[in-house]
Amino acid sequence: MHRCLTLLLFAAALAPCTVPAMDFRQAGGTLVMSGPVDDLDLVRLRNHLAVHRPTLVVLHESPGGDLWNGYQVGNRIRDEKLPTAVSGKCESACALIFLSGTERSFTDGRPVAVTMVGLHGAHSVESKQPLTELSPRMAYMIRTMTGSKYPPDLLHRTVYPRNAEDMVYAFHPARYAATAAGRGIVECLKQPDVSFKCAMVDGLDALGIGVITKPEILELPDEVKAALP
């Protein structure tokens, strides 16, 4: 559950650990974006789109990062009317970029058991304190991008976390039996002993709350899988 980068207040700051910038790879008509979101990714995306015309954006193994750039990259993807898909783990600012896709799906880039979209509230990297002044905008974005399907009570817990590292994960419903009470929406809450307590939310799945718009798992072409870092 440890994440090196978390949502930041402004584009000027990055987490204190050393990490590479987000990686952009074009494979056929697919743009693969992986790694942490940083303060130059909007410029990188603009430069990339000036040369390439992707028809799909795959978010692959990203811990998230800079909140402002996450919003702006997501806005650009939305303006381009591009669908998004997820491969592996996509958390924090990456999840906001994913939600900006006009259509959204899970892929077979990584096994379904380790593919997930994780949302949490903004917080300060230095103090680990939630930045609740940023919560209304985040709530608006999640509510809008999911077509108001994201349940209000879960949305409130997502953007106003008790602990800065609390996370709501969305797994693909196909990972669970159709008769199961909970089908892939998991809340992971940080405990006083620094462990996490995770529990499935009954009655909810990624399609029903609008995190994904398509129930089918997208099969990626071999050239795209070869481009996954």
Image (cartoon, rainbow, N blue to C red):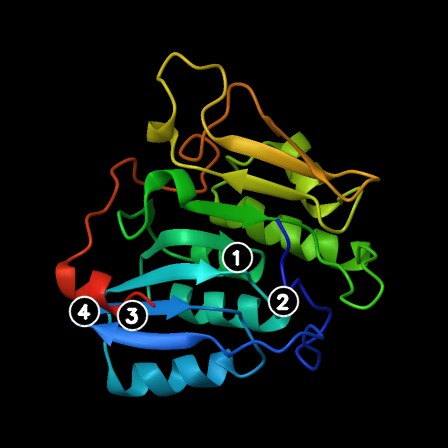
Q: Which residue is mark 3?
A: 31
Rendered view: 196 above or below 24: above
Looking at the image, which is closer to me, 197 or 193? Answer: 193
Q: Which residue is mark 1?
A: 96
Whole-percent x and y of residue 40?
A: 53, 84
Alpha-carbon span between mark 2 and mark 1: 9 Å
Instruction: Please tell me whether mark 2 sits on a helix, a strand or a loop.
Output: helix
Looking at the image, which is closer to me, 141 or 223? Answer: 223
Q: Which residue is mark 4?
A: 29
Looking at the image, which is closer to me, 160 or 182? Answer: 182
**Of pointers 3 and 1, the one earlier in the residue sequence:** 3
> Which residue type does callout 4 highlight?
Gly
Alpha-carbon span between mark 3 and mark 2: 21 Å
Q: Image quadrant of residue 158?
A: top right
Q: Which residue is mark 2?
A: 67
Whole-percent x and y of residue 155?
A: 64, 39
Q: Are marks 3 and 2 in contact (CB under 8 Å)?
A: no
